[in-house]
Image (spheres, grey):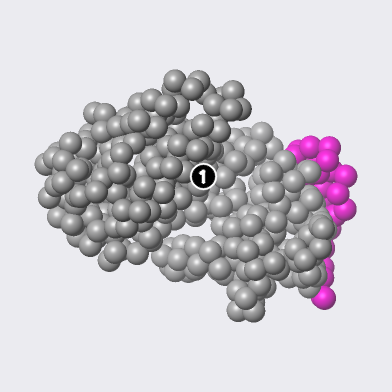
């Protein structure tokens, strides 16, 4: 296999074409607007040449990669493609319509991979009439930089197809995480508590946004705090994913959308792209414009004791935080731990795949299962016991199968 067609020449399609060409594959880039595909090729060439300027790639390798990318002006130009990767808008009807127009031009055994981050691979395959050939190949943006590819097996996807897609992604220099076709796959499900529980801690008066962000960066070693990150992602995008995952998993309380974030969306304060979200970006430095809840939750002695022990297990920086921020950090991390356990129990993926996905898909400092192991079972158990006694709606109830 050495030829890939890419449907969609937007940012993600460009990124995948970039990755495939560097991986030695011939690329046919197809877009409904041919001018967009040509502009995409020019953009990819510019980025590859920039790598040469920075000493990250030889000029010969860059030119060879550029030469491997062509614009497919007609569907028939995809006739030699072993693989077609779809990277267009997240709308099932549009995906089905676009792919249906191309399938007849592909080899009969060509693999059809979708870059969807939220739609059902199984449903897409069934609607296309070739479910055994359809697989999820979920890259993360920007595709040339982010290491992870979630390889998603639909209910009827051939095992050989899944293995082949995994092998291709690996050959293209990516780290793979195999998972089942479930809402949110791994990353978009397991990451939800990082945002949701942080907002709940804010509502409960455990800290200001910059304090919670600082605790998660400096004490827990995340690259960005939850409020910084949601401002960057866009609260409209973040809440839409939350609503989708929450509703698809039968609306568990731990995944429920949070009023404070929904209010930002309602007011149009979507984050960096609108100039204001949790922080205002009007000045030289971001300034928090949302404060903690007026009625701070009561910190019980068992809760603060558990949070203190948890902070010590995390590290010296965590131990130096005041008790409210220690509780907030424990709640956010235990939220992540718990969702990872639920994802494993629900058959989404095994512990190794979940850890891999969270490390390389969203750059977490550790995978949740490895982190729980490092913190230690007694400390983790004490944290969950205290949280279950203190936090309503059974948000920290672990699955019966445990970790």
Q: Determine if residue 188 is in view.
A: yes
| Coordinates of residue 384 in the picture (x, y in percent) | 66, 52
Image point 49% across, 22% down: which residue?
59
Image point 77% across, 66% down: which residue?
282
| Coordinates of residue 350 in the picture (x, y in percent) | 44, 39
Give the prevailing secondary structure in the magenta stretch. helix
| Coordinates of residue 178 in the picture (x, y in percent) | 39, 39
The image shows a total of numbered marks equal to 1
Image point 47% across, 43% down: which residue?
43
- Magenta extent: 294-323
Residue on which disc 1 sits:
142
Image point 75% across, 63% down: which residue?
281
Q: In which quarter of the view is residue 396 placed?
A: bottom right
| 222 vs 305, nearest the viewer | 222
Query: Taking 269 as reference, is 110 left or right?
Result: left
Query: Taking 62 as reference, is 360 left or right?
Result: right
| Coordinates of residue 186 in the picture (x, y in percent) | 46, 48
Q: Indicate yes or no whether the magenta region holds residue 314.
A: yes
């Amino acid at each position: 296999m050495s030829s890939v067609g890419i449907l969609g020449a937007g940012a993600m399609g460009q990124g995948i074409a970039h990755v495939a060409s560097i991986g030695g594959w011939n690329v046919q880039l197809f877009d409904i607007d041919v001018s967009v595909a040509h502009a995409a090729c020019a953009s990819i060439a510019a980025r590859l040449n920039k790598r040469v300027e920075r000493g990250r790639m030889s000029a010969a390798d860059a030119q060879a990669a550029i030469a491997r990318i062509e614009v497919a002006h007609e569907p028939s130009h995809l006739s030699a493609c072993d693989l077609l990767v779809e990277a267009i808008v997240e709308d099932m009807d549009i995906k089905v319509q676009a792919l249906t127009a191309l399938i007849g031009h592909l080899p009969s055994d060509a693999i059809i991979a979708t870059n969807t981050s939220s739609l059902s691979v199984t449903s897409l395959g069934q609607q296309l009439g070739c479910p055994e050939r359809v697989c999820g190949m979920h890259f993360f943006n920007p595709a040339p930089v982010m290491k992870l590819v979630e390889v998603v097996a639909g209910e009827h996807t051939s095992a050989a197809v899944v293995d082949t897609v995994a092998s291709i992604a690996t050959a293209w220099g990516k780290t793979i995480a195999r998972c089942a076709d479930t809402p949110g796959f791994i990353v978009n499900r397991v990451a939800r508590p990082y945002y949701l529980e942080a907002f709940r801690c804010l509502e409960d008066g455990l800290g200001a946004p910059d304090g919670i962000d600082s605790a998660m960066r400096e004490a827990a070693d995340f690259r960005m705090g939850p409020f910084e990150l949601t401002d960057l992602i866009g609260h409209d995008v973040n809440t839409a994913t939350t609503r989708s995952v929450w509703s698809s998993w039968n609306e568990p309380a731990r995944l429920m959308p949070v009023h404070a974030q929904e209010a930002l969306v309602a007011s149009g304060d979507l984050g960096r792209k609108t100039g204001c979200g949790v922080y205002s970006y009007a000045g030289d430095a971001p300034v928090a414009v949302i404060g903690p809840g007026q009625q701070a939750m009561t910190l019980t002695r068992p809760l603060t004791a558990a949070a203190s022990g948890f902070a010590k297990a995390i590290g010296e920086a965590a131990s130096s935080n005041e008790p409210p921020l220690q509780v907030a950090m424990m709640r956010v991390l235990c939220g992540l731990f718990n969702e990872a356990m639920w994802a494993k129990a629900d058959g989404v993926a095994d512990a190794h795949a979940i850890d891999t996905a969270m490390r390389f898909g969203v750059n977490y400092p550790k995978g949740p299962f490895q982190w729980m192991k490092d913190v230690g079972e007694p400390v983790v158990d004490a944290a969950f016991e205290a949280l279950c006694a203190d936090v309503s709606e059974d948000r920290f109830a672990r699955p019966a199968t445990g970790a």
